[in-house]
Image: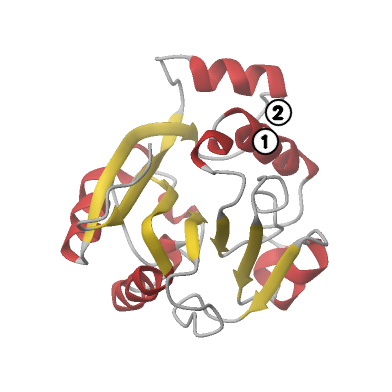
C-alpha cells in the first residue's frame, strides 16, 4: 500500500523502541502462557518482541506477514472482523496507533469483536495519539479520520461495555522522527520518569465490565 511507502515506511529505530518498550514495560502485563492478539500490527514490532504463550497479529496490509516472526500467526484482514479468532481465546489485545484510522462505527464494531475474543480477566491495551496534546500535528497523517483524547477514549470504551483499568494521558512522544536518539537506555529512563517531556501519546487499558483485570 502507498501508506507504507510514504507515511509509514519501515524504520529500524521503531524496532529498537518497541523491543525496549516490551522488555521494560509491557512484559509485566503479559503472563508466560497468555494468548496475545495485536490489531493493526504493521511491521510487527510489538508482537515480535513480547514473550507469551501464543501470538496472533492482524492487519489489512498483506505485507505485514513478511515482517512477522515464525512464532506469530498472521491474519490478513480487517480488525473489525475477527471471525478467525475463537470466542474467549485471547488474554491480551494490543493496538498501537490504530483506532484514529477508523470511523467511529467501525471502532465500535471492533470493540464488540474484542469483547467476544477476550477471556475473563483479559484486557484491551491501547497506545494512541492524545488529541489534547498533539492537535497541531494530528492531521499531518492524512489517514487519521477520528479524534480521541484520553477523556473521550475512556468514555467511548465505557459506552461500549468496557471498564477502564488504567489511563496514562502522557505516555510516549508522538513519533520517532526527531533528532533525539532512539536509545534503549534513554527509553528506560523516560519510562521510569514521572515527568514526560514531549509525551503526546496516551496508554489506556480496559477490561470487560464485571471481569477484573489482573494487575
Q: Which mark is residue 89?
A: none
Q: How many marks?
A: 2
Q: Residue at x 43, y 50 (%)?
A: 125
For the point 80% across and 43% down, the residue is 12
| Residue 171 vertical placement versus 101 (above, below) | above
Q: Position of residue 174 (x, y in %)?
A: 50, 39
Q: Quadrant of residue 147?
A: bottom left
Q: Quadrant of the N terminus?
A: bottom right
Say if residue 17 shows up in the picture.
Answer: yes
- Say whether residue 7 is visible: no
**Residue linked to disc 2:** 182
Q: CA distance from mark 1 to mark 2?
A: 7 Å
Q: Nearer the viewer, residue 88 or 72?
A: 88
Q: Quick check: marks 1 and 2 in contact, CB under 8 Å?
A: yes
Where does label 1 land, which residue?
17
Is the residue marked by circle 1 packed among few (<14), some (14-19), or many (20+) residues within 10 Å? some
* Display coloring: secondary structure
Amino acid at each position: 500500500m502507498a501508506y507504507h511507502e510514504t507515511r509509514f515506511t519501515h524504520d529500524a529505530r521503531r524496532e529498537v523502541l518497541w523491543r525496549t518498550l516490551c522488555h521494560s514495560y509491557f512484559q509485566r502485563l503479559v503472563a508466560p502462557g497468555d494468548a496475545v492478539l495485536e490489531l493493526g500490527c504493521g511491521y510487527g514490532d510489538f508482537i515480535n518482541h513480547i514473550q507469551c504463550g501464543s501470538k496472533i497479529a492482524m492487519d489489512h496490509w498483506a505485507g505485514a506477514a513478511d515482517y512477522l516472526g515464525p512464532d506469530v500467526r498472521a491474519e490478513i484482514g480487517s480488525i473489525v472482523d475477527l471471525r478467525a479468532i475463537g470466542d474467549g481465546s485471547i488474554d491480551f489485545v494490543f493496538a498501537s496507533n490504530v483506532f484514529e484510522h477508523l470511523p467511529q462505527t467501525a471502532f465500535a464494531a471492533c470493540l464488540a469483536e474484542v469483547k467476544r475474543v477476550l477471556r475473563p480477566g483479559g484486557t484491551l491495551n491501547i497506545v494512541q495519539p492524545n488529541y489534547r496534546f498533539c492537535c497541531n500535528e494530528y492531521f499531518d497523517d492524512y489517514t487519521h479520520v477520528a479524534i480521541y483524547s484520553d477523556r473521550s477514549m475512556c468514555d467511548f470504551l465505557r459506552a461500549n461495555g468496557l471498564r477502564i483499568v488504567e489511563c496514562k494521558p502522557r505516555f510516549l512522544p508522538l513519533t520517532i522522527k526527531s533528532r533525539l536518539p532512539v536509545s534503549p537506555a534513554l527509553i528506560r529512563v523516560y519510562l521510569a520518569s514521572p515527568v514526560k517531556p514531549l509525551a503526546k501519546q496516551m496508554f489506556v487499558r480496559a477490561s470487560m465490565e464485571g471481569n477484573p483485570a489482573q494487575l
